[in-house]
Image (cartoon, rainbow, N blue to C red):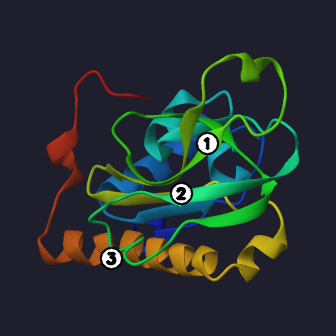
Amino acid sequence: EKLKSLHLIVPIWTMGQITAEQRKPVIEAVASGVGLCGCHGGMCDAFRNDVDWQFMTGGQWVSHPGGGVEYTVNICNSSSPIVDGMLDFKVVSEQYYVHVDPCVEVLATTRFPVAPGYHASNKQVDVPVTWTKRWGYGRVFYTSLGHVASVFGIPEVPEMMRRGFLWAAQGKDIAVEKKLDPADFKDPSKIF
């Protein structure tokens, strides 16, 4: 119940384990309207063995071929205020290759491959860098940027994160104002 009183949860945990007892309150809090926001490995490489966590966050890290490489972040045409008015930009950091839930709204992408490797034998592919998703009445925001502090010197990065965090946190006020009940989404088969 304490988590449900928050406006925003920002996980900062990489490659750990989470039990069902630890995960369930987070999943239920987000479904109630609490926002969930994260960047880089702190959210979408947190619990590799937990598919329920991945289902809620919308993606899972797979690799970063080449380690730190220069790549372009391409802003997608979107109605989202999170990227409104932003232009493409370059970063030097880990270029995250992620598996992504097809229901996310992709706000920014990057083109693979940049670095050589077995994956380069495939055609070029655009992989999401930043996305949003709904989880019950909660709003989820994620960006794979953030491995090195220097990316925060690129004006678009902290601005995108600021807007994304605010967008996610606003879901709580909407849920409270409209007296929305996450039980509306309950499925007798349950996911956990």
Q: Quadrant of residue 176?
A: bottom left
Q: Nearer the viewer, mark 3 or mark 2?
A: 2
Q: Amino acid at mark 1?
A: Arg
Q: Amino acid at mark 3?
A: Gln
Q: Position of residue 122 (x, y in %)?
A: 65, 18
Q: Residue at x 52, y 63 (%)?
A: 37
Helix, strand or loop at disc 1?
strand
- The residue indicated by pointer 3 is 170
Alpha-carbon span between mark 2 and mark 1: 8 Å
Q: Quadrant of the C terminus?
A: top left
Q: Position of residue 129 (x, y in %)?
A: 57, 51
Helix, strand or loop at disc 3?
helix
Q: Is residue 15 left or right of residue 19?
A: right
User: Mark 3 packing: few (<14 Cα in 10 Å), some, or many (20+)?
Assistant: some
- The residue indicated by pointer 1 is 111
Of labels 2 and 1, earlier in sequence is: 2
Mark yes or no: residue 23 visible: yes
Q: Nearer the viewer, residue 178 or 101?
A: 101
Q: Nearer the viewer, mark 3 or mark 1?
A: 1
Mark 2 in CB contact with mark 1 (< 8 angstroms): yes
- Residue furthest to the right in view is 67
Q: Nearer the viewer, residue 59 or 88?
A: 88
Checking the image for residue 74, the label placed there is: 2
Q: Residue at x 47, y 42 (%)?
A: 58
